[in-house]
Image (cartoon, rainbow, N blue to C red):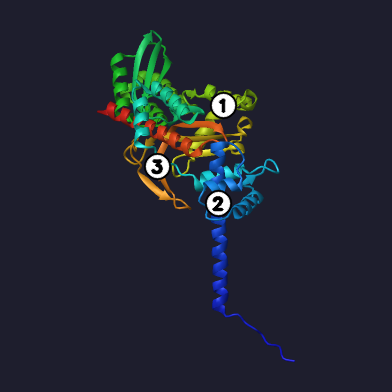
Amino acid sequence: MMRRCVSIPFGRAAHTHVLYTKGARMTQSRRMLVLRAVVEDYIRSQEPVGSTTLTRDHDLGVSSATVRNDMAALEDEGYLIQPHTSAGRIPTEKGYRYFVDRLATVMPLSEAQRRGINSFLSGSVNLQDTLQRAARLLAQITGQVAVVAAPSLSKSMLRHVEIVPVSVNTLLAVVITDTGRVAQHILNVAELPDMTVLAHLVNEINTQCAGVSLAQTADYVRRMGPRDAYRSISALTETLAQAFDGMADDERAGELYMAGTSRLAHQHTVADLAPLFDALEEQVVLMKLMSSLSETAQSAGVGVAIGSETHTPGLLHASVVTSGYGRTSAGNAGGMGTDNRSEINDFGDEIQTEPVTEPVAFVGSIGPTHMDYVTTMAAVRAVARYLTAFLAHDERHTND
């Protein structure tokens, strides 16, 4: 008995495979839209979200039963969790991470919002006042804890130095950096130097080292000592070089300005917030976390750590959003009203991106994992951009 082999034409098989692949891709895209809707609804209501609510409130183009199946699949994949058998779903840490990375956009603030930020912050009288105002403003916008760090000396460049005698064996070095920081160092000497020679030393440092890092300034000052013009004060040049070295090695943020802890306390019970408040007390740990996060920020200039990603026990149920501020390589500070570049994410959303900035400090917001990420990320980025513009304007004003 002869067997007949029935073959499927190659073209039909390929077409079937393409349709299957396209269908699977469409299903996965729809599930991610369902995930986005769940995250948005849960952030707004803080109540478990069901399929009926999603079908009613979002234009997903499918039935409630299909949405229910998608939510079950998302739960199996670890993006959602069902707290109770009869309840809807809530996002997991993985779900929030996907939302932040792929779905949420850093929306530019409206013109009115930008004017409001400019108006509030432009009334400041100096860098310290500006940073304090920035923390209060960010806490007011987000309803969360705001943290603003002053620029660290290790990332600053020399703007100007002055050395003045304060006693027969003591000089005071006053160092002003490009970030507005002012540092004072006591220089102990065996006897006061010749004031003319000292004046020449200071003038040369200001001429040759303005705009140079403090570490490079230390090297330059150290090389000045053996020269004939400064041999009589070689011990002083070494002492001054060591002072610059100490500032260059100072990795600490000058100060941390915090606001919003009382506002957050009014929204939650004290028991829920106890670990968070403990974490806020550990300023060194907090500074390292937020500084590192701001330096590895995404293309939109904002870094986000969610729950366990913070590697901080007190922040296991919190999220941290931060952005660095400082020098920009784009030739301008971007300004509050300028969005320099944009790109399109996986779902066709336009994401505003930043000119490349060398952070000297950070702006951050700390709140629950169900925080409004879109608003928080936009506010953090806007305040960071303002501070970058403030530093650039302050430097231009000084150089004019």
| Amino acid of disc 1 | Gln
For label 1, count other residues whose C-alpha is less than 10 Å away and answer few (under 14), some (14-19) or many (20+): few
Residue at image mark 1: 267
Regarding residue 175, the answer to whether it shows in the image is yes
3 or 1: tag closer to the N-terminus: 1
Query: Which amino acid type is shown beneath numbered disc 3?
Result: Glu
Give the percent coordinates (x, y) of residue 129. 39, 21
Q: Which of the two labelled residues, at mark 3 and mark 2, occupies the earlier sequence position?
A: 2
Q: Residue beneath label 3, please?
A: 354
Q: State how far apart marks 3 and 1 are (Cα).
A: 33 Å
Residue placed furthest toward the bottom = 1
Q: Residue at x 39, y 11 (%)?
A: 191
Residue 123 position within the rendered picture, expressed as x and y whole percent measured from the top left: 34, 22
SS for dot 1: helix
Q: Position of residue 71 (x, y in %)?
A: 62, 50
The residue indicated by pointer 2 is 32
Q: Confirm or deny contact between disc 3 and disc 2 (CB under 8 A).
A: no
Q: Callout 3: 10 Å neighbours few (<14), some, many (20+)?
A: many
